[in-house]
Amino acid sequence: MDAVPTTTPFSLLAERWQPSAAVVKRAAFAALVMSVVIVVTGGAVRLTASGLGCTTWPRCTDESLTPTAEMGFHGVVEFTNRMLTYVLSAAVGWAILAARCHRPRRRGLTKLGWAQFWLVMSNAVLGGITVLTGLNPYTVALHLIAAMALVWVATLMWERSKEGDGPARPLVAEPIKRLSYVLVGVIGLLVAAGTLVTGAGHHPGTPKDNKMVPRIPLDYDRLAQAHADLAFVSIGLAVAVIFVFAAVKAPPAARARSRELLIGLLLQGVIGFVQYFTDVPELLVGLHMLGATLVWIAALRIPLALRTREDTPTPTEAPAARAPQAAAV
């Protein structure tokens, strides 16, 4: 006896709504855009000294879910960033539903969507811990790294939404693929080093006269120099990748993305040096955070351009292919 398929709210919705491939791509892209927005607005909370605009979590105060008039501008900024988490969750939810209801069902994309959901939830809790610990710089850094992990998965889902669901087929030799992984790893270290510079730097997230916010007990200038050194390594490696891709005639998309990464790194370097020698003004720091997110995305997209995935046959296609053999028997 055949097993009766389990009916779920998702399966019921899939019977009534089958989004096109274009809708799935737009949904995945919307989730990626919101993951970038949440990084930038989180930076705005710190740069406007609104990190403790809401004094507790999950409420804004012990008595109120929303900011009170006495909390002023800082309370509004912090609370707005919290509310944007719901917008992000809605975008991720749309991506999950679009992947689940598409025909044929995109199981791999659905899993990536759920991974984003759980990253959003865990990062919301981590944000609450950050507030409850008085903006401990280590939890602030971990909060940003978790947000970059969300960007990673969102980027993967967006790129996968433009491909088939068949097995990945490499378009270059294994050493070239490993080189792209090394590049991603170095860019990841560059971003992580930036969080340490932030933790020891000039913008703790509260007014400057607040001595209660701890900072990472490392020399700021040395951390900034280490960060700059990693930037030079990243730029050199990006240049090397461009030449290697040209020499082995890597796919045009991979070569274009490597050039985009180099441009992003150079712009980031200019912003970084200017902000360092101008006492890290808030606007430039915000631009640097946005640039770091875009550079991270650019690096992640390079290995994804070095392989391809074809569509797998749908269940209705497979019997048709076997039909001649059955007739012969």
Image (cartoon, rainbow, N blue to C red):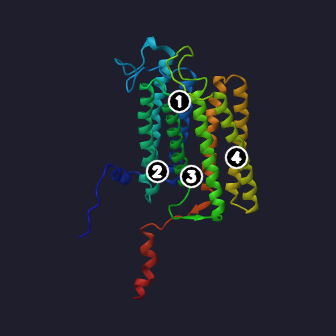
Cα–Cα gap, marks 4 and 3 = 16 Å
Return the x and y of residue 92 as percentages of the image width and height: 46, 42
Please give the label number shown on residue 42: 1
Q: Earlier in the sequence, mark 3 or mark 2?
A: 2
Residue on which disc 2 sits = 112
Please give the label number shown on residue 260: 4
- Disc 1 marks a residue whose amino acid type is Gly
Residue at 48 percent across and 25 percent down: it is 135
- Disc 2 marks a residue whose amino acid type is Leu
Cα–Cα gap, marks 1 and 3 = 25 Å
Looking at the image, is 49 positioned above or below residue 110? Answer: above
Local packing at callout 2 (Cα closer than 10 Å; few below 14, some 14-19, many 20+) is: many
Please give the label number shown on residue 159: 3
Return the x and y of residue 26 as percentages of the image width and height: 53, 46
Q: Is residue 193 left or right of residue 154?
A: right
Return the x and y of residue 144 as percentages of the image width and height: 53, 35
Q: Earlier in the sequence, mark 4 or mark 2?
A: 2
Cα–Cα gap, marks 2 and 1 = 23 Å
Residue 307 lies in quadrant: bottom right
Cα–Cα gap, marks 3 and 2 = 11 Å
Q: Earlier in the sequence, mark 1 or mark 3?
A: 1
- Disc 3 marks a residue whose amino acid type is Glu
Q: Earlier in the sequence, mark 4 or mark 1?
A: 1
What secondary structure is found at the residue carrying circle 4? helix
Residue 283 lies in quadrant: top right
**Residue nearest the observer in this picture, 157 or 24:** 157
What secondary structure is found at the residue carrying circle 2? helix
What secondary structure is found at the residue carrying circle 1? helix
Return the x and y of residue 277 as percentages of the image width and height: 73, 25
Mark in front: 4 vs 3: 4
